[in-house]
Image: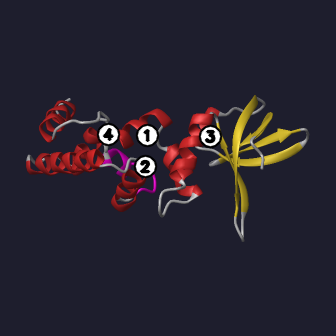
Amino acid sequence: MIYFLKGIVHSVLKDSIVLNVNNVGYRLYVSHTSNYQQNDTILIYTYNVLKQDTNYLIGFTSKEEKNIFLSLIKVNGLGPKTAINILSGTDPKTLCAAINSGNIAYLKNLPGISTRAAQQILIDLKGNSNNETSQLNYEEARLALKQLKFKVSDIDAALASINEPNLTTEELIKLALVKLRQ
């Protein structure tokens, strides 16, 4: 298995880069292609997806990003492409904070993530009763804000920006109201 590659960025594509390593071009799917510039020399950590009908490499800028990816692909129902899409919509620190705080609204706003997938991420990656309480608090806050006639998209954006664990429903509502009134 290839642990990392060091080479020169040959080209930057929509969802991937081509890395020249000793005159061999490796295509790597990456989370944020805007972080790469043609002709830059980089070290990139890799994960090889090897299935019956496909074989491709995914690249990561840090060990932390790779470890989060490895955690995400263990979630029931998430594959490598969905996991890299999730990472394209966030950064590792914010994603971990959202998971630890049970912020389902934040997870649902990530690319390719449905309510069910967001719930599964929380179940598989946090997996304790405190998480269930946090999830419930976010859902109750969302419902209360909907009753106050705020737009659902604005509510979800406000709640998605709050990644603090152990907040009560009332605390979540207060913080979200501050953000909604800005």
Q: Position of residue 87 (x, y in %)?
A: 52, 44
Label annotation for residue 83:
none
Circle 1: residue type:
Leu
Circle 4: residue type:
Ser
Disc 3 marks which residue?
33
Q: Quadrant of the C terminus?
A: top left
| Earlier residue among tags 4 and 1 | 1
Disc 1 marks which residue?
95
| Contact between labelled residues 2 and 4, with CB atoms less than 8 Å apart | no
| Earlier residue among tags 4 and 3 | 3
User: In this rendering, would 50 be left or right of 89?
Assistant: right
Q: Position of residue 31 (x, y in %)?
A: 58, 43
| Contact between labelled residues 3 and 1, with CB atoms less than 8 Å apart | no
| Earlier residue among tags 4 and 2 | 4
Residue 109 magenta: yes
**How would you rate the neighbour count of disc 1 (Cα within 10 Å): few for under 14, some for 14-19, many for 20 or more?**
many
| Contact between labelled residues 3 and 4, with CB atoms less than 8 Å apart | no
Quote the CA–CA distance across marks 1 and 3. 19 Å
Circle 2: residue type:
Leu
Q: Quadrant of residue 11?
A: top right
Q: Quadrant of residue 159?
A: top left
Disc 2 marks which residue?
125
What residue span does the magenta drawing correspond to? 104-113
Disc 4 marks which residue?
101
Quote the CA–CA distance across marks 4 and 1. 10 Å
| Earlier residue among tags 2 and 1 | 1
